[in-house]
Amino acid sequence: MDKSASGEDSGSIDWNTDDELEIQEYTTFSSSLTLATHGTEASAGNGGENSSAIVSDSKLVNHFVGMGFSEKLVLKAIEENGGGDTDSILNTLLTYSTLEESPPQQLCVNSDPIFSDYDENLLCDLSDMDGWSENETEDSTSLSEEHKRLLSLESTGSLSEKEKMLLLLAKMGYTVEECSIAMERCGPEASVVELTDFICAAQLSREADVYLPDDDLKPRYNGVCKIKKRKFFEICKKKNDPETETIRLPNPMIGFGVPSLQLESISRSLPDSAIGPPFFYYENVALAPKGVWDTISRFLNDIEPEFVDSKYFCATARKRGYVHNLPVQNRFPLVPLPPLTVQQAFPLSRKWWPQWDPREKLNCIQTAIGSAKLTERIRNALERFDGDPPTSVQKSVLDECRKWNLVWVGRNKVAPLEPDEMEMLLGFPKNHTRGGGISRTDRYKSLGNSFQVDTVAYHLSVLKDMFPDGINLLSLFSGIGGAEVALHRLGIKLKNVVSVEKSKVNRDIVRSWWEQTNQAGNLIDFDDVQALDGERLEEVISYVGGFDLIVGGSPCNNLAGSNRVSRDGLEGKESSLFYDYFRILDLVKSIMHRPA
DNA sequence: AGAAATATGACGCCCCTA
DNA sequence: TAGGGGCGTCATATTTCT
């Protein structure tokens, strides 16, 4: 413990104490400073750092073949680039493929022959009318006593595992009673998937002949549930089955292209059921627990998520997955292009930025920031040295800087980002979240949960030519209005925006932005996605005349890696609201497709 | 004085990459 | 095989606002 006695090579500093820091001669660090980014702009010297090119060749080939390039092309590109730098290889491949007429053929979602049997839409009459709606609405009068009891226990956190599962299934639209039966039959270890599969099968067999449309009895949308349970079950159940491939994150994480690497020739085919109108756009964290994106994809018409890191759009990383049915050709970025490096984004910091801090991009903007104490400890540690600190200190400081996204604001002085700096990095107008009685803490929270506007705008840009007169937007989990801002900055007119957002401060932010930008359309806001049932949607749709686009990024609390307390996956308390996104999307489709 | 906002530190784990 | 990154949450202490 006594660091001061003879603590040789105290390689790392204990940032959590105010003790004297005893830095001795340090042992050499095997890992020199590695660049955190795969940035294309910084790859001056390839080859130098990678000596195992031959060993990784087959891996490399597979990597690019997996992206949809032909093996021949990949081999050629690797040969040309010496097998070292994936970015250079990618560049070469992209050059080739724009020269060639034939587009890469992977990005074809429906190519899995195993499941083609299940392509028909199963019609599951899920429970009763109020199946999807939830607590504390007047609908609860029609819930069973048991369901109500569970709901009342939910807030107290005193639910058993079994009861939690029951409630989750109830939220998905099944009755508590049929869930109980399913859980009895499937056993205590059964997964959600197994249970829903069981329930669905039971319903199908029970109601096989009561299945004809009865338009005059009740609105169709309450009973229509186009989940391909069977397929969903197959995919999710067998994680270890080599036959079933779970969704993997691409590297580089550029989706169907980014402004600096436009994949002109890329195309994808969507299942018929996925084709709009309306268009939809769903977002969540890319690094979710295993299986989560498979499930999301299954629910959203089996569309493969587009994973994109916003570091290709701005100076801060943001790894996200987007499931959407938008065209992917002829996208264009917002102008002016935002600064792509920290140095460009914060010119004043250049003066203080030590040459041993190689960061060009910031890490993901989160909801929490580094403490003042930490930055003080860092300054104290650095001021013990005249010139550059020893490698061990550099490493410790860098670790903290990366962990808390600190920037240099003075000699030996680091600081967390200010809210207005985050706004800029995320593509919002300055002071977007400021004022109107919104606290600093709330700003950080809202910004940490927001879209990166340039990224989203790039994806939505294809709508501009399609809707010269503007669009009607349904924005779920709107937050501080990332989608609205993106569309506005693209010059896409907003006719009617129905925005659903739980937090009042966020609604206020969007409302105030709406007024300040002199929007000509209507902004209608709701506070609860769960209360947005078929009836209300019908009203809204008949008022605005249908939606052109449905955007939403459902809560990631239970998916995000930094959550140590309740990283429960899609079934988590907040993240299960994804099913409401799915439900509402499905309802809107049903209503809009219903013959008038 | 009481309420609200802010500040701080403690708290794993999964999955990828090197 | 080791290392690092991540739209987080909670209780408690302290400061600032009403």
Image (spheres, coloured by chain):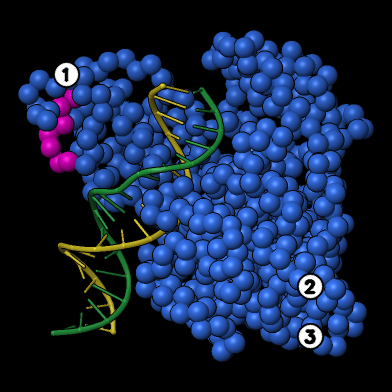
Chain colours: A blue, B green, C yellow
Is residue A295 shown left or right of residue A95?
Answer: left
**Residue placed at 72% from the left, 57% from the top?**
A229
Up/down of A3 relative to A147, above or below: above
Q: Position of residue A506 (x, y in %)?
A: 51, 72
**Residue reaching furthest to the left:** A5
Q: Nearer the viewer, residue A435 or A266?
A: A266
Gap between marks 3 and 2 measured at Cα: 16 Å
Q: Is residue A110 above or below residue A46?
A: below
What chain does mark 3 sit on?
A
Q: Of the residues shown, which amino acid type is indicated by label 1?
A: Glu
Q: Secondary structure at mark 2?
A: helix
Report x, y in % for residue A476. 63, 69
Is residue A10 placed above or below A407 in the rendered structure? above
Q: Name the foreground residue: A502 vs A309.
A: A502
Q: Which residue is mark 3?
A: A218
Q: Quadrant of the N terminus of chain A?
A: top left
**Are discs 1 and 2 less than 8 Å apart at CB?**
no
Residue behind mark 2: A207
Which segment is the magenta one? A17-23
Check whether the beta carbons of the residues at disc 3 and disc 2 lie within 8 A of each other: no
Q: Which residue is mark 1?
A: A8
Q: Identify the chain of the residue marked 1, using the numbered disc in the image.
A: A
Dot 3 or dot 2: first in sequence order is 2
Q: Is residue A18 magenta?
A: yes
Q: Nearer the viewer, residue A178 or A283?
A: A178
Q: Tag 3 or tag 1, which sits nearer the N-term?
A: 1
Q: Residue at x 66, y 35 (%)?
A: A241
Query: Residue A171 appears in which quarter of the rendering?
Result: bottom right
In this rendering, which labeled residue sits more in front, label 1 or label 2? 2
